Image: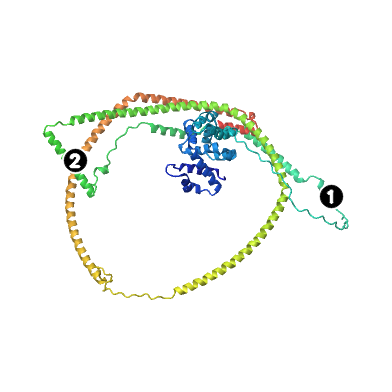
């Protein structure tokens, strides 16, 4: 059982693809492609037994899984039904054989949330010893249920509850899983051959010492370079102290929150652009360009000309029918059309007034939002002042903890380096031994490579000789010439059989007949084309007449609509004057709040510049705290 995820997936897949009504159990196992994907025989036996058990105890497993989907598993997918069936079978019948270790690994390969939900439902005492036991007793004998089904589960009840609790902790992330600490590695001495005892060497003559020079006096005196270095160190320290004091007295550039004149001008320009975008500009109709008034006629193709001619003809027929109906005494709908046009104009006036009112209401709500945002910013600045003190205390606590951790880490590094020094000599001896082994293996491999190269060269020479013999055999010429008589037939015995000469003569006759037929069709096409061109010319003249009349009528209607729209705009401006006055009042209030906020900011900056620099702390921690406070603000 090396891959638990694959075993569980194959078991579920085999159970899902099984159809008890059409395929037998053994035939399904023999034809299963998922079972063939397993290479280990033990894994195949495991999947086969699980599948057979799930099919045999299908009624028992179905009671548990259906109950789970009815109560706790309402949010679980139906595609996981067979997965829960396999887990139910393993817990009820195979838990003692598998053991809790293998069962936990199988469960942990799936989603933790749904596994915790299913196991918590199944192990719950009110379910297992309650309605599940009662339902099982209906299907099976009570003795079989108590001895075979419930007794293994009750034997592992404590371990299962602990496992469900671990899954619950992982789901809720209430605590980290316990880490098992491995015992430290104990160093063992090398099993090396003890050296033989050496023989005592002959005693050597003790040499006499030569006369030595006296120690110079400069050895006991302090060198001049140390004095020069100490003086340079002292001067550098004084310069750094002076620079630190100057930096403490000066104000940091990042604390200056006042915007420059250029930034203020850009912000004002942006506000003006936004207001200009939100202002209401009534739509003005554009005049017809001069280059379109006397435009050249557009050249139309045949389809467009015929389509326009059909449209003109249909309009003429409609006008004729209309005039005929008026002569017969029918009613004229001009009065209705005039009333309909008045109603449309009235609706357009209402829509225009409603649009202007919505636009002014939007500008009014925007001004109110800007005023509310300015008030919110003022409250935020007050809260930032309260957060500065809290951040300063937290930073001091953080630096004290960091210093303690650094001391502990320094001690740990020193202990580790001491252990590394002891292992350096043993590593050197081991490296030398490995080098000898590598040299010996390299020598043997070179000998084998040389032998293989000689065999390959002999094989290559043999193949070259064989290829040369084959090429000599292929270079021998073969006479394949065959004389053909074009006046004779093939002699196949067919009724329509003919020679090549007769075939060429018949083809020439067919070409002459095709040329005559082509000339006849060309004349017919030319006559049809001339008739069609005459029809198109007449249609174009009729279309031009109707277009001129339609342009004159459309120009007249456009002038009437322009006058009506102008009257509508004047009426809508009168009804929207109260909203415009209210909008101007809100803008003045916003400008007044902006001026007040700028005055307060300038006062705060003057107070910050007047404060003496001596009250600031000169320690690195306090400097970092000041920068942090300015960043928070």
In the drawing, does residue 308 fall left or right of residue 599? left
The number of numbered discs placed on residues in the rendered structure image is 2
Dots 1 and 2: beta carbons under 8 Å? Answer: no
Q: Position of residue 48 (x, y in %)?
A: 51, 44
Res 331 label: none
Quadrant where the image shows the N terminus: top right
Q: CA distance from mark 1 to mark 2?
A: 130 Å
In the drawing, does residue 324 fall left or right of residue 285? left
Image height check: is 309 above or below 78? below
In the drawing, does residue 310 fall left or right of residue 416? left
- Identify the mark nearer the N-term, 1 or 2: 1
Circle 2: element type: helix
Q: Which residue is mark 1?
A: 215
Q: Position of residue 581 (x, y in %)?
A: 37, 24
Res 549 label: 2
In this orientation, which residue lies closer to the viewer: 439 or 99?
A: 99
Image point (47%, 74%), residue name: 472
Circle 1: element type: loop
Quadrant where the image shows the C terminus: top right
In this orientation, which residue lies closer to the viewer: 507 or 246?
A: 507
Given the current orientation, which residue lies at the most extreme left position?
Answer: 328
Image height check: is 589 above or below 627? above
Foreground mark, 1 or 2, reads 2
Q: Position of residue 4 (x, y in %)?
A: 55, 43
Q: Position of residue 588 (x, y in %)?
A: 42, 25
Using a 10 Å C-alpha cutoff, classify the residue at mark 1 as few (fewer than 14 neighbours), some (14 to 19) or many (20 or more). Answer: few
Residue 436 makes an appearance in the image: yes
Using a 10 Å C-alpha cutoff, classify the residue at mark 2 as few (fewer than 14 neighbours), some (14 to 19) or many (20 or more). Answer: few
In this orientation, which residue lies closer to the viewer: 605 or 586?
A: 586
The part of the image, by quadrant, that contains residue 361 is: top left
Image height check: is 339 above or below 237? above
Image height check: is 308 above or below 404? below
């Amino acid at each position: 059982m090396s891959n638990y995820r694959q075993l569980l997936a194959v078991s579920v897949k085999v159970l899902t693809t099984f159809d008890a009504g059409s395929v037998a159990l053994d035939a399904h196992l023999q034809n299963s492609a998922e079972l063939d994907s397993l290479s280990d025989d033990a894994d195949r036996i495991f999947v086969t037994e699980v599948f057979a058990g799930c099919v045999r105890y299908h009624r028992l497993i179905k009671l548990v899984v259906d109950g789970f989907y009815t109560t706790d598993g309402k949010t679980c997918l139906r595609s996981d039904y067979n997965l829960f069936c396999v887990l139910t079978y393993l817990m009820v019948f195979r838990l003692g054989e598998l053991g809790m270790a293998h069962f936990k690994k199988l469960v942990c390969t799936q989603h933790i949330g749904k596994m915790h939900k299913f196991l918590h439902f199944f192990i719950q005492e009110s379910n297992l010893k309650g309605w599940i036991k009662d339902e099982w007793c209906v299907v099976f004998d009570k003795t079989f249920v108590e001895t075979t089904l419930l007794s293994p589960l009750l034997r592992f009840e404590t371990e299962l509850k602990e496992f469900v609790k671990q899954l619950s902790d992982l789901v809720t992330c209430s605590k980290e899983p316990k880490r098992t600490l491995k015992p430290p590695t104990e160093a063992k001495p090398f099993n090396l051959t003890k050296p033989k005892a050496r023989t005592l060497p002959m005693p050597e003559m003790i040499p006499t010492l030569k006369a030595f020079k006296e120690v110079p006096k400069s050895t006991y005196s302090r060198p001049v370079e140390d004095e020069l270095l100490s003086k340079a160190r002292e001067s550098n320290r004084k310069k750094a102290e002076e620079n630190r004091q100057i930096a403490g007295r000066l104000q940091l550039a990042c604390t200056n929150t006042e915007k420059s004149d250029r930034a203020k001008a850009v912000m004002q320009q942006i506000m003006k652009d936004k207001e200009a975008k939100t202002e209401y500009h009534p739509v003005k109709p554009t005049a017809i360009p001069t280059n379109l008034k006397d435009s050249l006629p557009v050249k139309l193709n045949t389809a467009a000309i015929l389509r326009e001619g059909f449209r003109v003809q249909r309009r003429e027929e409609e006008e004729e029918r209309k005039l005929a109906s008026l002569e017969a005494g029918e009613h004229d709908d001009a009065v209705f059309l005039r009333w309909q046009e008045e109603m449309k104009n009235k609706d357009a006036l209402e829509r225009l007034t409603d649009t202007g009112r919505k636009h002014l209401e939007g500008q009014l709500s925007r001004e109110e939002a800007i005023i509310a945002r300015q008030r919110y910013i003022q409250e935020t600045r007050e809260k930032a002042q309260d957060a500065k003190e809290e951040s300063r205390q937290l930073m001091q606590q953080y630096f004290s903890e960091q210093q303690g951790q650094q001391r502990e880490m320094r001690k740990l590094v020193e202990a580790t380096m001491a252990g590394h020094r002891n292992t350096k000599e043993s590593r050197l001896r081991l490296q030398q031994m490995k080098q000898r082994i590598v040299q010996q293996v390299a020598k043997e491999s070179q000998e084998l490579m040389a032998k293989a190269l000689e065999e390959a060269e002999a094989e290559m020479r043999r193949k070259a000789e064989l290829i040369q013999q084959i090429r000599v055999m292929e270079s021998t010429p073969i006479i394949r010439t065959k004389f053909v008589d074009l006046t004779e037939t093939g002699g196949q015995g067919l009724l329509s059989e003919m020679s090549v000469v007769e075939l060429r003569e018949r083809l020439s006759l067919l070409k002459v007949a095709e040329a005559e037929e082509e000339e006849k069709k060309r004349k017919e096409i030319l006559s049809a084309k001339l008739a069609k061109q005459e029809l198109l010319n007449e249609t174009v003249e009729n279309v031009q007449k109707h277009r001129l009349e339609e342009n004159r009528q459309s120009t007249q209607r456009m002038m009437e609509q322009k006058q009506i729209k102008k009257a509508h705009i004047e009426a809508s401006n009168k009804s929207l004057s109260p909203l415009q006055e209210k909008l101007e009042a809100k803008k003045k209030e916003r400008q007044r709040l902006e001026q007040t906020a700028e005055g307060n900011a300038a006062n705060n900056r003057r107070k910050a510049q007047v404060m003496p620099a001596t009250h600031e702390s000169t320690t690195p921690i306090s400097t970092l705290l000041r920068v942090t406070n300015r960043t928070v603000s």
